[in-house]
Image (tube, rainbow, N blue to C red):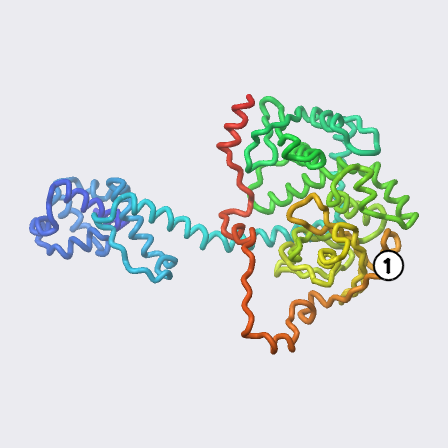
Amino acid sequence: MEEPADRLVFGQRIKHLRRTRQLTLEQLGQRLGRPASFLSMVENGKRRVRPEMVTALAAALEVEPDVLLEEAPPNRRAELEIEVERIQQDPIYQSLGLPYLKPGVRVPDDAMTHLVALYRALQERVRVRPETQEEVRVAAATMLADARNRDGYLVDVEMVAAKALAFADYPGSGALSPRHLQDLAAGFGFAVKLASDLPRSVRSVVDLDSGRIFIPQRDALRTRAARSVVLQTLGHIALNHDTPTDFGAFLRQRMECSYFAAAALIPEGAAVPFLDEARRRRDLAVEDLKEVFYVSYETAARRLTNLATHHLGIPTHFINSDEDGLIWKGYENDGFPFAHDPYGGVEGQRACRHWGARAVFGSEDKFGVHFQYTDTPAGTFWCSTHIPADRTPHHGITLGTDFDHARFFRGRETDRHSHSGCPEPGCCMTLATELTERWAGSVWASSRAQSNVVTALTASPIPQVEMAEVYEFVERHA
């Protein structure tokens, strides 16, 4: 005979059998020659039970010893009581400073079910989230370093996009038409369909059985955005992506799909001669690329960033930031002095208020193109920043380069000139001494609730899809 492996389960089995036989603790104690207090501690898992006591208890309860040693709780109620006991032994629970809750008969099953579910969610937040945030930062920093090492140019994705365009019979210049898009999708065995009832958690749905890609109708998605969504969806197929198993894989797949879409919308074969001629004339401009290929300003800026160093020999930096200066996307291979997190990432950092990326929001012509030179600890940089009016909330899209290469860009004659000490603490990250002495202790400010508060509380940084809605959607359209 052996000792019970799990005292709590063993105690619940004793309690269940005692109650089934309508025995009180005192009555069972009389059969064993033990006080009721001893049996109470056994039932609550607080006393070690030796093999000889297991045999005695089995005899007193008229069962075989193996029945008492079964590893499963006797019923759902016992399972809940065990779970509540274990929860209260957890250091996370004990750190809350709450009084002990005895899971007795007066506590309903529903209440204990809620308590168990809520505490499991708390454990998930406390134990998993710090690791997940580190994973997000490391993955973002790793991808940024890889992009910098490759000068923002992904030759393998360029080749896949070029082959897809060849099948679509793209003429080699100008905007990708809806007919070209349909032909390109057909090359992968798909047809593009518009739907008014697409689930809110997705930007597209692919029905692999029928070979259809569903996207929102035009009243919900503009033409340029629709093309990008279709191409990014096809990018997953063209690049043979599997379901991502971690955030690093998810982030890389999204980046590659965005690159594929940009390479299809602004093909390398057509864009490079166009840009090279503009460089020769010293008239490079994001807005020209935007108009010629009928794409968004951000797509044009990112595509120019992709091609500038590899084909034109021009180092660049790129920033997508909001009105508060929060950097959503950042890249540089020209030495631009971004602030970095401890892992080397720039997303989530603040743009200096003296940079063009933030100065544009206070300019007189807010939705024009803002040109500016900025002196920094790493040298002088030129940039052009534009706020697309059709995006809400507004974001500034910045393309820049070092002083030596500014001569190739339109807007180089600007007389806007600022000085930034960032990321050194003496710039906009440190309060002026005289203002601190004047106002410290006399001012209180309430911050705006932002989406990053909710994001920090999510269980996973990978956006979740409501698959029940997706399956219902596909069934409706089958």
Residue drawn at (83%, 52%) of the image: 314
- Residue 333 screen position, x and y as percent: 76, 55
Tell me if mark 1 has few (under 14), some (14-19) or many (20+) residues whose alpha carbon lies within 10 angstroms of its own: few
Residue at far right of view: 281
> Residue 278 or 70: which is nearer the viewer?
278
On screen, residue 374 above or below 24: below
> Residue 288 or 123: which is nearer the viewer?
288
Q: Is residue 173 left or right of residue 298?
A: right
Q: Quadrant of residue 441?
A: bottom right
Instruction: Report the number of discs.
Output: 1
Q: Quadrant of residue 66?
A: top left
Residue at far front of view: 364
Q: Which quadrant holds the C terminus?
A: top right
Residue drawn at (69%, 65%) of the image: 423
Q: Amino acid at mark 1?
A: Asp
> Residue 268 or 362: which is nearer the viewer?
362
- Residue 281 screen position, x and y as percent: 92, 48
- Residue 161 screen position, x and y as percent: 75, 34
Residue drawn at (86%, 51%) of the image: 410
- Residue 293 screen position, x and y as percent: 80, 37
| Residue tagged 1 | 404
Give the secondary structure at mark 1.
helix
Q: Quadrant of residue 157?
A: top right
> Residue 348 or 14: which is nearer the viewer?
348
Can residue 149 be seen in this snapshot? no
Can residue 252 be seen in this snapshot? yes
On screen, residue 428 above or below 265: below
